Image (cartoon, grey):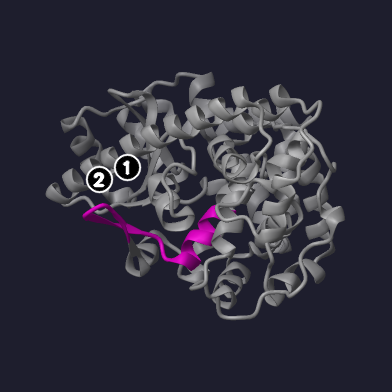
């Protein structure tokens, strides 16, 4: 990392409820716990501990394998049945992750034969590059970034190896999605929705100016690094691009699952990360507040030391702490949002720090149809442009 970390760890008050199941989950939320956190795990008083609540939260937040490994390594006084359960959970996640990794390699090799350029993010590539262990990061699908121009070719290539779109769309609707959407899900032999092709990092209506920071897909492809699975190397995002993509993804979901903050905390710990460059790109895109909230949550919940430049993001935007406190409380309660509700749209509005971005977001939010409109009304091909009117009507009902 290009600058020194803050010397002092977050205060003990940073953990929300000392001794609770969620508190232990946060203490276990690191691939390599610092000595102080490892000691807390080792000395944890499990008398009367609510293991059913802990397991429920761990499953909900996607961190069961990570917590299981840390408890098995550092907690000497685990009940034997819990120890066996954790061993089984870690082993099962590792088996699943290895399958996904091999499938990712198979898909990328087939794409290469068909001259389809793609780059994975999250999933096995993130687990290997950031956590250093495929068994520590849980995931239920594969995510591949491609260009919109390559979508038809990628879709045909996937059909050749057994993948089909989860939802059939008419030609005009699919072309509409390629303009204003950002992803399509695919089903395979392993189940439904096991693969996502994404030609944008966010839906169009979020109005994030990726071009302003050289953060379009072509830029990500150009800066891509590599990660190895055994003897195979696959492309992956540069450390700086990966961190920003993870923050955008977590912000899109309002940080409702702890695993997304774990991803960010692990990325912040990467020694090769140029955080000055990350912050410059975030400011250019108008997502400095999203990056600030992400860093604040990584420190508050997981004890990640953040560099001074990230501290400036927190200290110079009062809304970072205010929003962070709100999201931290919801994470602890395992509370989610209806992602098509007025409340969700208002939260995304608050995350934008520039007035111009806020107004552009409102305009696109009102006028951009999405999957909800297509599911709500089946329009004939000649009337596809009217989905904008359907969007406006549905949004008015939700907000008012």
Kind of element beneath mark 1: helix
**Disc 2: CA contacts within 10 A as few (<14), some (14-19) or many (>=20):** some
Q: Give yes or no for residue 156 being in the magenta stretch.
A: no
- Residue picked out by circle 2: 105
Q: Name which quarter of the figure residue 78 lies in.
A: top right
Q: Nearer the viewer, residue 227 or 223?
A: 227
Kind of element beneath mark 2: helix
- Horizontal and vertical percent position of residue 364: 59, 47
Does the rendering let one see residue 120?
A: yes
Vertical position of residue 194 compared to residue 315: above or below = above
Q: Are marks 1 and 2 in contact (CB under 8 Å)?
A: yes
- Horizontal and vertical percent position of residue 131: 48, 53
- Horizontal and vertical percent position of residue 376: 54, 20
Chain part drawn in magenta? 227-247
Q: Which mark is residue 374?
A: none
The N terminus is located in which quarter? bottom right
- Horizontal and vertical percent position of residue 47: 80, 29
Q: Residue at x 12, y 48 (%)?
A: 113
Q: Name which quarter of the figure residue 289 lies in.
A: bottom right
Q: Residue at x 81, y 70 (%)?
A: 315
Which residue occupies the extreme left position in the image?
113
- Residue picked out by circle 1: 101
Q: Nearer the viewer, residue 53 or 115?
A: 53
Which residue occupies the extreme right position in the image?
13
Left or right: residue 13 versus residue 83 is right
In 3D space, how far apart are the residues under numbered discs 1 and 2 (Cα atoms)? Answer: 6 Å
């Amino acid at each position: 990392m290009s600058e020194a970390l803050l010397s002092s760890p977050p205060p003990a008050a940073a953990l929300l409820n000392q001794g609770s199941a969620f508190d232990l989950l946060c203490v276990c939320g690191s691939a390599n716990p610092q000595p102080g956190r490892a000691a807390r795990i080792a000395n944890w008083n499990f008398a009367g501990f609510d293991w059913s609540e802990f397991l429920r939260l761990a499953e909900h937040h996607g961190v069961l394998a990570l917590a299981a490994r840390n408890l098995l390594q550092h907690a000497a006084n685990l009940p034997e049945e819990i120890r066996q359960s954790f061993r089984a959970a870690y082993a099962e996640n590792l088996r699943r992750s290895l399958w996904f990794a091999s499938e990712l390699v198979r898909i990328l090799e087939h794409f290469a034969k068909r001259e389809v350029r793609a780059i994975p993010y999250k999933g096995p590539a993130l687990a290997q590059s950031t956590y250093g262990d495929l068994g520590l990061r849980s995931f239920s699908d594969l995510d591949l970034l491609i260009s919109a121009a390559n979508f038809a070719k990628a879709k045909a290539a996937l059909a050749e190896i057994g993948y089909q779109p989860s939802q059939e769309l008419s030609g005009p609707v699919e072309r509409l999605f390629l303009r204003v959407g950002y992803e399509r899900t695919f089903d395979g032999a392993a189940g439904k929705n096991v693969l996502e092709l994404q030609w944008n990092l966010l839906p169009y209506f979020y109005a994030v100016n990726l071009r302003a920071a050289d953060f379009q897909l072509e830029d990500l492809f150009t800066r891509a690094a590599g990660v190895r699975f055994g003897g195979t190397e696959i492309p992956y995002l540069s450390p700086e691009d990966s961190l920003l993509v993870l923050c955008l993804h977590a912000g899109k979901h309002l940080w409702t699952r702890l695993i997304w903050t774990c991803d960010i905390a692990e990325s912040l710990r990467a020694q090769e990360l140029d955080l000055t460059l990350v912050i410059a790109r975030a400011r250019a895109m108008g997502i400095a507040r999203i990056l600030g909230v992400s860093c604040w949550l990584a420190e508050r919940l997981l004890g990640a030391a953040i560099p001074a430049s990230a501290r400036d993001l927190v200290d110079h935007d009062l809304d970072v702490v205010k929003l962070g406190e709100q999201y931290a409380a919801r994470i602890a309660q395992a509370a989610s949002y209806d992602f098509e509700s007025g409340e969700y749209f208002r939260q995304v509005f608050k995350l934008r720090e520039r007035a111009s971005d806020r107004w552009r977001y409102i305009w696109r939010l009102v006028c951009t149809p999405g999957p909800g409109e297509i599911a709500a009304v089946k329009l004939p091909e000649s009337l596809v442009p009217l989905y904008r009117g359907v969007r406006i009507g549905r949004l008015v009902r939700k907000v008012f």
